[in-house]
Image (cartoon, rainbow, N blue to C red):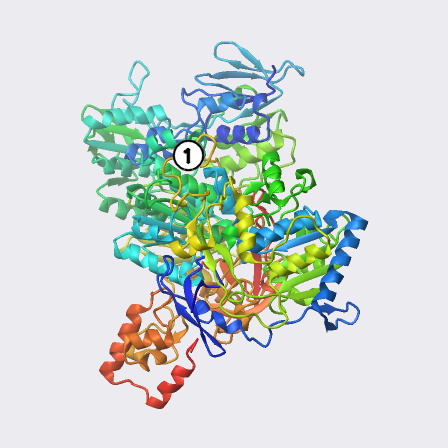
Amino acid sequence: MTDTHCPYCSLQCGMTLERNGSRLEVRARSFPVNEGALCRKGWTSAGLRGSRERLTSPLIRDRTSGAWEAVGWAEAIGLVARRLTALRETYGADANAVFGGGGLTNEKAYQLGKFARVALGTSQIDYNGRWCMSSAASAGNQAFGIDRGLPFPLADVEQTDVLVLVGSNPAETMPPAARHLDRLRERGGKLVVVDPRVTATAERADLVIQPVPGTDLPLALGVLHLLDAAGMVDEEYVATRTTGFEDVRRTCASWWPERVERVTGVEAGTVRALATLLGEAERVIVLTARGAEQHAQGTATVLAWVNVALALGMPGKEYAGYGCLTGQGNGQGGREHGQKADQLPGYRSIEDPADRAHVAGVWGVEPGSLPRKGRSAYELLSALGTEAGPRSLLVFGSNIVVSAPHAGQVAERLAALDLLVVADIVMSETAALADVVLPVTQWAEESGTMTNLEGRVILRERAVTPPEGVRSDLAVIADLAAALDAPSTWPDQPEQVFTELRRASAGGRADYSGISYDRIRAEDGVFWPCAEGDPGVPRLFADSFATPDGRARFVDVDHVGPAEELSAAYPVHLTTGRVLAQYQSGAQTRRIKELPDEGPFVELHPMLADRIGAHDGEPILVRTRRGELKAAAHIVTTIRPDTVFVPFHWVGVNRLTNDALDPSSRMPEFKVCACQVTV
Amino acid sequence: MTRPIVVVGAGMASARLVEGLVARGLGDRVTMLGEERQPPYNRILLSAVLEGSHRPGALALRSQEWYADHGVDLRLGTRVVDIHRDRPEGRRTVELADRQELPYEQVVLATGSIPTLPPIRGLVQVDGRLHPKVHAFRSLEDCARLLDALPTARSAAIVGGGLLGLQVARALSVRGLRTEVVEGGDHLLRSQVDETAGQVLARSLRRCGTEIYLGARAVRLTTAGLRLDNGYTLDTDLVILCAGGRPHANLARRAGLTVRRGVLVDDRLCSVDDDRVYAVGDCAEACSDAYGGQPHGFVPPAWEQAGVLAARLAGEDARYGGHRLVARLRATDLEVAVLGDPRHEPGEIVEVSNPIAGTHRRLVMRAGRIVAGTLVGDLSRIGTITQHFDKGTVLGVREAGALLLPDPAPEGTPGGMADLPDDAEVCACAGVSAGRIRACVSLAEVREITRATTGCGGCSSTVRSVLEAGAAVGVRLAGERREAVRKTSPSR
């Protein structure tokens, strides 16, 4: 019996794994986020073990014939190290790049960042978390001086009066979390869901608001307009705990309900209903997720909703405030320990001299030897194989040809590399394009910590022995570092790496120095920040914010609109999202036979279906300026008639999406672009 | 320091223009001259202030400090009397009421509109001021004066049955006054909608307690009240003038610029006579606007023009190509939206009207596009209809009609739980069908075998109902089949 957590989303549900002969059985375990519930992904998560598709030997691909050859580890590591060294000698350290993932444990994320900066000396490292919650991260840093997805335990949402979910569908993306919504409503609290679709989550809501994709921001401006007009702003809170409200107030003065209606497609009366609900509530929680964040104006959109929460005086108040529902399993921890282009462990800045000195000290290298900040995820991928860009890429825990926007172009860039190395558990779509594939351990075969959506550091424990032939990511990194003759030390045991991570994070914004594996086991996880000897902080901002003056910042943002406007040729909005039975690029979930995989589909309204002559279940063609996809029509009345929805778990979907980036988070505009739909 | 850009007017169009200039780093090149004492405020929300749903303090678009902080020289309470545009380069000025002259290189007229004073005897006293009962309703000052008069007033007559008149009438009704609307035309909102829509609206307004006099002109204000030309005399405490307005273009006329209804400008928003003089908003008449210029009093076209002009003054090549107008009535319990010009726009009409229910919706279609429309009493689809109108979406042959009808009921609307087919999915989290639940004898067994209800918990009540219905009608699978169901359960 091993107590651990689910391998998938940021909820990190508690579960117990039990060996039964050769089988590994999943049992639900009571843990604060899931209280004994699991979704079908969790129940079936042991199914990937023993899959025939599991990779158990390093593979090298012959580029001329395309043939794969299984080789020994020494040969594979030696080959990769030689190629990396040669590229570095010829083109400089930035010729080699690293791409990580938000599903990697804290230890792996930490070690990967260290490997890039110390062993490769490259500035070129980033990760797929840019495509997850980076807009909320950027907004959190600007408004509160800190980026922790939820500043309170998830179960707090049950105790609030009005919960607003903006672009979030937990009933399908993290089902056990929806129990907290039900309990909120049993208590008499109200649930508001803002989504272009009436989702399974929206079906539970007291108020459903269906804006045009890309217009959550003006909706927030309109709500604040009405709150100010009605004198419902908490002026004392604004005066004592915040700065910057005056400009925000004046900007919102221009967003009267009928103007909001024109832009958002939400009837003015509905905007008024929302403002009244919020203005009259004692406690309000606003949570955003990818629907609000994955836009070229994603950061501004989050800030607009943060402004609403601040104007109501909510952040820092018990059972109230703003939070982001992170998506990936370790979306939170993955962005704190150095796999992001501009960061060092402990949420330190790679451009700050004191931060560089501290981390270099822990690593035993000269601060001056650490590179500066590199390209963000999509910019990094766009630069691959170009004159100025990297010539090799090492990918850990990411399936970029499925998950990146404008994925057709990403595949082209990968093909232009001198060397692509992918560490994965199965032959993912990205691994299939690699020169070298390194088979690694998966969940349950290794230990490591994750930081869930609440900022709670939890421990996934090893439950079974990995199959013959695979190595852990930490061991691969250690082997490569040794072969590259890198300075510093490279332990491959998770707890050893965590001990080093604690030191590296000490004194940083995300301070883990007081957290240990034993404490995590004993306390159902520990919330950061947690300095040595501290209890950890489940609830932030009670007395002050993490800004220099302790006050939250109102940031004056205004609506610009999606990067791609509708046109005569592309007259319909395309938005993307998840379905319950799949996770991210589907590399894991599609290989679990108990999970149904009906492939991608196109959800559209009967009016649009009738316009183009589509029939339910029959294929239709979705085309954007970047690519096209044929998939079955799902005709539903629950979506806006001017919008279609396609789940993103399958290769092909992100060939459609727009690669316009948010100026501050560098988040691509996954959630809205212009498309054409035909039969 | 010379400030080459002089903006005459400090209303909503000017505010938008200056914000655009500030955003482009040109704030310290701008002088903004306003006649009112207040910095620019959101004029179109005055009726909400009158109603009591909007704090007057929340109207300000930017504070005086904001302009100062961004280098703009904002002068309030300042009237421009002349533009000396025929002088040589470098000596052109605008002249203020105090004879001071401000040099300009480019001057923007954003003087808005002035309310029309209807020909009612007794409206103006011998001293030239309005009769104490009479109120205009254009500025914050007008609004404040009217608010001051409310505590002692029990009734109000509103002259003019257009958008503003109806908003004011509803606002005063909400405040508890008995209100009457006098409209010279044969129906309400006659500039925007056809007679049928006007009749539906009148019916709704009467239901809200407002009396309406159509085809009637107020001719005289006496101590007995407001006398109409149909013989009635309305005994009223207040008379509010909402009879529309006209572009405030006197300054342009005086300066010898071509003025039709408004200052005539081309698609650069430049006067057709002088390319150093621009005009935006209500005082302007753009050649590119359809049907002889934009109806006045609407902010979105003015702001679109202001955005274009800010770009032009910063040296960008932006042009104004006209505007798709959506006029919305902002009044409690009166739902009206007018898209484009439904009275004049040619096209095919798709219409659903139910005067008994107080609804009238009409879409004017041309080549598959919504080119104009009227929505009265039912705005449930406005968020889709205006999007199609704005984007010029080409709709299907049945789509315009579908937009005016409710969504079809979803297919397979469930009857009793006993009727739920065996393959219907009951629990999405665990992927469990009704059949597999029926194969279980208890909720505990359902949880243990199928995992249904163990995810988000949303299906709990359905599962219980399916189990109970199954028990009631004896739906129970044979033991053999139950075994098969068990075998296909996940993780077993």
Of residues B289 and B94, the one nearer the viewer is B94
Left or right placement of residue B362 versus residue B266 in this view: left
Of residues B181 and B491, the one nearer the viewer is B491
Position in image of residue A449 (x %, y %): 50, 56
Any part of residue A669 in sight: no
Image height of A252 relative to B438, above or below:
above
The residue pinned by badge 1 equals A253
Left or right placement of residue A1 versus residue B318 in this view: left
Q: Secondary structure at mark 1?
A: loop
Residue at horizontal 46%, vertical 68%?
A41
Image height of B422 relative to A304, above or below:
below
Image height of A398 relative to A505, above or below:
below
Q: Which residue, as the protein is rendered here, is positioned at the far right?
A: A90
Residue at horizontal 63%, vertical 26%?
B275
Left or right placement of residue A392 versus residue B129 in this view: right
Amino acid type indicated by mark 1: Ala
Image height of A421 relative to B251, above or below:
below
Of residues A431 and A205, the one nearer the viewer is A431
Check the picture and name the quadrant holding the C terminus of chain B. bottom left
Position in image of residue A34 (x %, y %): 37, 61
Any part of residue B481 in sight: yes
